[in-house]
Amino acid sequence: MAYSFAWVRFHSVRFNIHVAFTFGSVQNLLNSNPFSSSAYPFRKYDLFMSTIVCKRVGFMYSYGAMFQCTIISAMLLLRCWALYDKKRVIWILCGGLGGSVISGIVIVKLLLDRTTFLDNPLPNIFSGCIVMIPDYVWILYIVPLIYESSLFFLTIWRIYGLSKDFGATPLMQTLAHNGTTYFATLVGIMILACIGGTIQPVKIAANASGVLSAMSSVICSRMIFSLYRINDGGIQEERTLSHTRDDLDESTIPRFAIPLQSLVSTTVSNNLSKPEQV
């Protein structure tokens, strides 16, 4: 099995929520004394729904959401890396990613300090943690929104510039379409979080149900899989062309920071379609 960045990112997002909810329960099991009289009879509320465990789950969930935003931003940064051959632009974007992570840690710390965890008065009737979160919890997504918006506009601007010189290749169309879809979804998620944070009955559902992380994860995974499909199609097309012609002219192929097989094969096919002059 090939372990790539996409593979690690895809599975880390999906296992993040399980790690968040099992962290507190496993640690509570290790810290409990099985020979103590308070350990019997076994009560589910004592294990999962205590205030301490709820704080641990909130801690892991908050930092897990920030970690997921960081992974998505890093994936979008790799798309810019594929399109830009100027190292200065990439270094500036890497610095922006570091600043986004640091600001996210500070914001999460402030939100956790202002979150109130209450004891469950009816554990046999109502399960879960009783939490009073601030109305401005959506501010956690503001910095990633600004950074990812910058990456989106840089990607679209670069694709537009390359399309004028080399035409709209399938790879460029895929990058533009997926980037636009993710950006529209991101803006919609932010609107949902802002509006949901101001309405008291749906505030918890909008900010703590995981819909924000789930939607961004689905769109980001779709972007990764579409690039793999384009790359596989480009490799097959290049192999087909290699059997029909031995000397391929690669002088018009644009230079990228990482190889993009679909763009190479498409440019080669365009060159082969031109009539040769004797």
Image: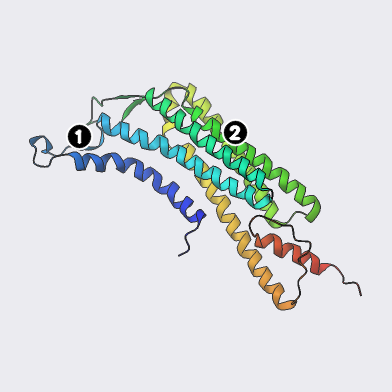
- Give how far across and how far down residue 116 sits, in percent: 34, 23
Q: Which residue is mark 1?
A: 46
* Residue at the extreme right: 278
Quadrant location of the N terminus? Answer: bottom left
Q: Is residue 250 above or below residue 46?
A: below
Regarding mark 2 in the picture, which secondary structure is present there? helix
Q: Earlier in the sequence, mark 1 or mark 2?
A: 1
- Give how far across and how far down residue 93 sits, in percent: 61, 41
Quadrant location of the C terminus? Answer: bottom right
Q: Quadrant of residue 182?
A: top right
Q: CA distance from mark 1 to mark 2?
A: 42 Å
Q: Is residue 146 above or below residue 134?
A: below
Which amino acid lies under the numbered mark 2 shown in the image of this protein? Answer: Ile
Q: Residue at x 65, y 43 (%)?
A: 180
Q: Quadrant of residue 128?
A: top left
- Give how far across and how far down residue 263 sits, in percent: 70, 60
Q: Which residue is mark 2?
A: 146
2 on left or right of 167: left
- Give how far across and how far down residue 240 sits, in percent: 68, 73
Nearer the observer, 38 or 247: 247
Q: Residue at x 41, y 36 (%)?
A: 63
Which amino acid lies under the numbered mark 1 shown in the image of this protein? Answer: Asp
Q: Is residue 133 above or below residue 28?
A: above
Q: Is residue 128 visible?
A: no
256 on left or right of 69: right
